[in-house]
Image: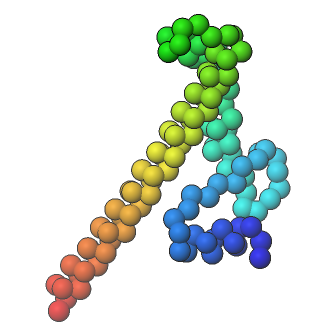
Amino acid sequence: MGKSRLADKFGETCPMINFTLGQAYFKCYPPVDVEVSSFLCKEMSEEIKEMICNSPKRGGKSSKFISENMAITTWNHTRAAAFLQACFEVCKLHQLSISLLRSVADADLCSSQ
């Protein structure tokens, strides 16, 4: 069984958020999610990097290497959390639309009886 079919099968019993990451020119199935890849791979601007590096430190001063590492980690975690939150919101909207459609169908069924 291929990875995509395995993920689809697993998704029948467990909630999953699937994306295909890679370069836009990859020829694969399912196709690469270009928007997702570009969002997750977006480089941190120098302005954001400076803001994070210049934020107050708990233990006083730290080396430039540690500050830059912290900035990169903060940037990546923030983007991942924002992306997951957006996915969850889409899932909630999808569930809401299913519930709404079910209510409309039930109301139609009751009125036709």
On screen, residue 18 versus residue 112, left or right, reads right
Q: Is residue 14 above or below residue 74?
A: below
On screen, residue 36 versus residue 60, left or right, reads right
Find residue 98 and report its horizontal and vertical position in percent.
Answer: 37, 69
- Quarter of the figure that contains the C terminus: bottom left
Find residue 19 and report its horizontal and vertical position in percent.
Answer: 64, 54
Residue at 18%, 85% in the rendered image: 110
| Res. 79 in view | yes
| Extreme-bottom residue of the structure | 113
| Res. 47 in view | no
Q: Is residue 41 above or below residue 88?
A: above
Q: Is residue 97 above or below residue 107?
A: above
Residue at 68%, 10% in the rendered image: 63
Q: Is residue 89 above or below residue 67?
A: below
In this orientation, which residue lies closer to the viewer: 12 or 106? 12
State the image quarter where residue 12 is shown: bottom right
What is the number of callouts on the image?
0
In this orientation, which residue lies closer to the viewer: 72 or 100? 72
In this orientation, which residue lies closer to the viewer: 109 or 94? 94
In this orientation, which residue lies closer to the viewer: 2 or 93? 2
Find residue 59 and report its horizontal and vertical position in percent.
Answer: 53, 13
Residue at 70%, 73% in the rendered image: 5
Residue at 61%, 21% in the rendered image: 71
